[in-house]
Image (spheres, rainbow, N blue to C red):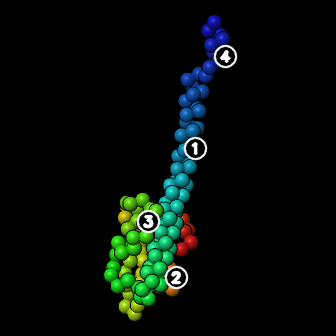
Amino acid sequence: MGRWLRLLGFTLIELMIAVAVVAILAALAWPSYSNHVLRSKVRLAQGDLAALVANVENHRQRTLSYPTAAGTAQFPGWSPGSEPGDFAFDYRPLPGGGFAVTATWQGGGKLSGCELVLRTGNVRESTPACDAAGEVGW
């Protein structure tokens, strides 16, 4: 009877080796996965900024001027798709009639100091910290 049970199952050594192999593979894949997640958060913030600019331009078409008050609360048609703790978004008018919208990373880690800026005329800027998880193409 014991002989048949041995043929149907795995030994403890075999199970430990399988678990060790899975743990090694997971340890190798984790950095790549975490960089992918951070890159996707930066790209989502870029999309949020583009949507905010669309709302700013919509306001300009309706009133023939850019908003003169700072902040994003004046754009009720816009809400960011980013998680609340990831990026903080801001609108500010610039001297001479232009504007700038910014997305600033709120957490620490690799993206600490990351700021994306989109100015009048589709001028895009970012700090070097935004590329910490890989090229984001801003």
Are the residues at dot 3 and dot 2 in contact (C-beta closer than 8 Å)?
A: no
Residue assigned mark 2: 122
Q: CA distance from mark 2 to mark 4?
A: 68 Å
Residue assigned mark 1: 25
Residue 30 position, x and y percent, is 52, 50
- Residue 116 visible in this rendered orientation of the protein: no
Q: Nearer the viewer, mark 3 or mark 2?
A: 3
- Numbered mark located on residue 80 in the image: 3
| Rendered-image quadrant of the N terminus | top right
Q: Nearer the viewer, mark 1 or mark 2?
A: 2
Q: Is residue 26 left or right of residue 101?
A: right
Going from N to C along the chain, the mark reached first, 1 or 2, is 1
User: Is label 4 in a helix, a strand or a loop?
Assistant: helix
Q: CA distance from mark 3 to mark 2?
A: 19 Å
Q: CA distance from mark 1 to mark 2?
A: 43 Å
Residue 89 position, x and y percent, is 39, 70
Which residue: 36% across, 75% down?
74
Q: Is residue 88 left or right of residue 138?
A: left
